[in-house]
Image (tube, rainbow, N blue to C red):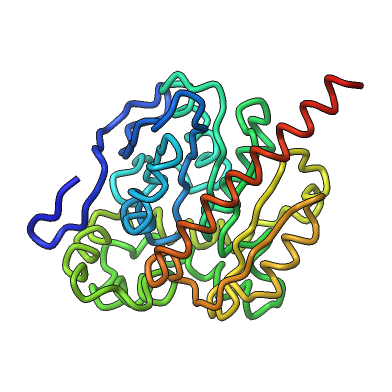
Amino acid sequence: MSDLYGIPPLPPGRTIDLPGRGTTFVRELPAPTPDAPTVLLLHGWTATADLNWFGVYEALGRHFRVVAMDHRGHGLGIRTRKPFRLADCADDAACLVDELGLESVIPVGYSMGGPVALLLWRRHRPIVDGLVLCATAGSFSHSRAERMSFLGLTGLGALARLTPESTKEWLTERVFLRRKAEKWGPWAMSQVELHDWRMVLEAGHAIGSFSAGDWLHEIDVPTSHVVTLRDPVIPTYRQLDLFTRIPDAEAVRIDAEHDAIVAHADRMAQFIVEGVHSVRRRAGSSDQMSTTA
């Protein structure tokens, strides 16, 4: 890792071809011990893997093998003419797990990454050991006004390449980096400029349409939640609704806004580490009970 030219310290990264799907960008840190689990970091809307996780890479790498990917249309993620679907993001993640030769992972989903993690469990259960869900929800728009806010973004897709820079910056500030550290500001905006804005805006539609309420009760892996208590993007009540619908879930709360992963990186890293360890303990207890039975 290095800190050069206003770029935060980042793990080694590379592009990976996902057969039949496209090419994406991945950051990786090796496992610190032979028995360390692998965490798969899934970023939020309008972010990239680096924008979302740069403040916690190093801390997580002291405990786990770390894999972080750019989602479709975001950063250096897959480019395609197909409409953006969260299910495709989950399938991309599963394909990446296979390409890396991993047997299983613990997905850590932040904001939009939460639905991707949930869908990864639902569509590829054998590779998911547990879930860590941060600042996210099982659905994002209940009222007509909320649905119109999200769904309206799809209509902008055809005009995405004409979207003014100020609008791009406003979207990113509003949804993710509300208080970018001044030190990393130019680098952060250079990350945003990598986006395919048609796909990113379609992702807004996908988020607004997502609802897992009918099947959250079926989740059968240990789950940990980090709930942001002053979140203007994903209200706390919606985060708590997700928590209460998943059987035997555990939660911690942080007095922070939606950008907690950046503004309070040290505490968030601690909560994620504790959440992953909790998932592993509960998974181990479950396995032991199954063997005894």
Q: Give the image quarter of residue 8.
A: bottom left
Residue farthest toward the left in the current orientation of the protein: 5
Q: How many marks?
A: 0
Q: Residue at x 77, y 27 (%)?
A: 287
Q: Position of residue 95 (x, y in %)?
A: 48, 27
Quadrant location of the N terminus?
Answer: top left
Q: Give the percent coordinates (x, y) of residue 56.
A: 38, 55
Q: Residue 36 appears at what percent x and percent y?
A: 49, 31
Q: Residue at x 65, y 62 (%)?
A: 137
Task: Pinpoint residue 258: horizontal percent, then vertical percent.
Answer: 49, 72
Q: Is residue 207 left or right of residue 176?
A: right
Horizontal side of residue 43 vs 215, given as left or right: left
At horizontal 45% and vertical 60% (from top left) the residue drawn is 45
When the figure is inspected, residue 97 is found, relative to residue 266, above or below; the finding is: above
Q: Quadrant of the C terminus?
A: top right
| Residue lying at the far right of the rendered structure | 293
Residue at 39% of width from left, 26% of height from top? 18
Q: Is residue 264 above or below residue 206?
A: below
Between residue 266 and residue 166, name the one nearer to us: 266
Which quadrant of the structure image shows residue 146?
A: bottom right
Apparent side of residue 198 relative to residue 135 in the rendered image (left or right)? left
* 88 w.r.t. 145: above or below: above
